[in-house]
Image (cartoon, helix red, strand yellow):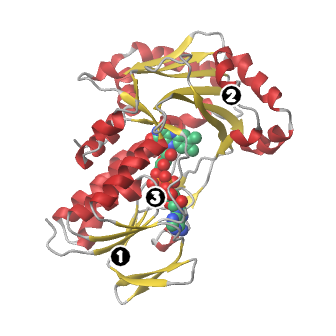
Amino acid sequence: MNPQPLKIGIVGCGTAGPAAAILLRRQGHDVTVFERAAECRAVGAGFLLQPSGMHVLRGIGILDEVLNHAAKVECLHVLDADASTLLKLNYHELGGDLFGAGLHRPVLMHYLIREMAASRVDLRWGHEITTLRRNNAKWALGTSAGDEIDGFDLIVLADGARSRHRRQIRGGGVDRGYPWGAHWFIGANRGVFPENELYQVVDGTRRLGGFLATGRDLDCGEPLVSLFWSIRLADDEAWRRRPLDDWKSEILSLCPKAEVLLGQIHDWSQVMTARYGDVRMRRWHDEGIVALGDAGHAMSPQLGQGVNLALADAACLAECLAHHPPHRALRHYQYRRRLALGYYQFATRWLTPWFQSDHEWLAPLRKSLFAVSMRIPPARKLMTLSMAGMIGHRR
Ligand SMILES: Cc1cc2nc3c(=O)[nH]c(=O)nc-3n(C[C@H](O)[C@H](O)[C@H](O)COP(=O)(O)OP(=O)(O)OC[C@H]3O[C@@H](n4cnc5c(N)ncnc54)[C@H](O)[C@@H]3O)c2cc1C
């Protein structure tokens, strides 16, 4: 245990922020979380919690409750436009009873916030951090209201893909973004999409639809499903000027099963646009400051790891601070996270254009590549381990 309680300021209450706050508060540190949103909103997409993320939630003590609201996803099933299987990865091939959990973001948020309150984390909604200033080996945080709060020994940046503060870390970081993103919507599943698979349909590299059973609504318990429809971001506005039915027809031509779900959309305002970051940092820490989650390594959600990596970052930071003084803890953090984060950043950058780009010529190659990989057990296992978030994961 770290003998010296630290005064820690965490910027952002998304995924990495609350997880780090709970674990660090339990070690006896004085933890304050600053979140710019005025209150906790029941919004957000569906996501796939992987065994790696479950491991962290088990440590926090909320896994069973979270899973009560989840869809138990046993495989990833990707079909080509001609309905042939392009890729099918089953969690059971990894042994044990591993699975993914389709979840609605407010569910995870609800339990993390409850646990922060129970751990007596000081959570301040409506506090946008606008400045970070180093002052006599401590940090001072400036808020959009013009206040300055000082005396922090450690700042945890968990302010997401568009972090305005990551440049405080020497070597900074760049966000190259992707020209492609997604339209997304969450609606009632009504028994159309099986709960046990993440279902995707692709046509070349320009059209992709993903359907994730997203467990049950936190309040009413209704089964949910998330739709992700790939778009070139430059076309977003043009799409939104067109009748909604044109967009629905485009999706239905590839995914006829989406009819019941699309029937729940009556206005473009129900359809959100997701932009993907591609954040590259030479290192994730500096004196008394560390970047976790998307702030340090946002990536396209092609491998669906963002939430899981953010949770694992938080757990790793807490472990490092439990065993080392702060300056060494941050170096250990960097050392321990480099393999998992390096792998997933590389794999995501490599994989994304095969599914979302104008390089249509990749599509036939993709078919051959996956057909061969699926028949070679070590290659299939590597793909399944990657999906489950197990590369570089320490239990
Ligand atoms: C379409 C889409 C699908 C995805 N699917 C998956 C999936 O299936 N599985 C998966 O694991 N991941 C998925 N992800 C990625 C995942 O959503 C992110 O990686 C994850 O939420 C990162 O958590 P975080 O805590 O780092 O950042 P965030 O969750 O973005 O939280 C950042 C928080 O910081 C706050 N903030 C920002 N700036 C300030 C400031 N200056 N002051 C105070 N507060 C501030 C924000 O309001 C926000 O609450 C997906 C992403 C997208 C876009």
Q: Is residue 18 above or below residue 206?
A: below
CA neighbours of label 2 inside 10 A, class few (<14), some (14 to 19), many (20+)? few
Say which residue label 1 marks: 287
Quote the CA–CA distance across marks 3 and 1: 15 Å
Quote the CA–CA distance across marks 2 and 3: 36 Å
Q: Nearer the viewer, residue 352 or 71?
A: 71
Give the residue drawn at x 49%, y 17%.
194
Give the residue drawn at x 80%, y 32%.
244
Q: Earlier in the sequence, mark 3 or mark 1?
A: 1
Say which residue label 2 marks: 264
* Ligand 1 closer than 8 Å to label 3 CB: yes
Q: Nearer the viewer, mark 2 or mark 3?
A: 2
Q: Position of residue 354 (x, y in %)?
A: 60, 30
Q: Position of residue 44 (x, y in %)?
A: 55, 45
**Which amino acid does the dot numbered 3 rest on?**
Gly
Say which residue label 3 marks: 296
The image quarter in which residue 63 lies? top left
Classify mark 3: helix, strand or loop: helix
Q: Are marks 2 and 1 in contact (CB under 8 Å)?
A: no
**Which amino acid does the dot numbered 2 rest on?**
Gln
Q: Earlier in the sequence, mark 2 or mark 1?
A: 2
- Report whether 362 appears left or right of 98: right
Classify mark 2: helix, strand or loop: loop
Quarter that holds the C terminus: top left
Quarter that holds the N terminus: bottom left
CA neighbours of label 1 inside 10 A, class few (<14), some (14 to 19), many (20+)? some
Quote the CA–CA distance across marks 2 and 1: 50 Å
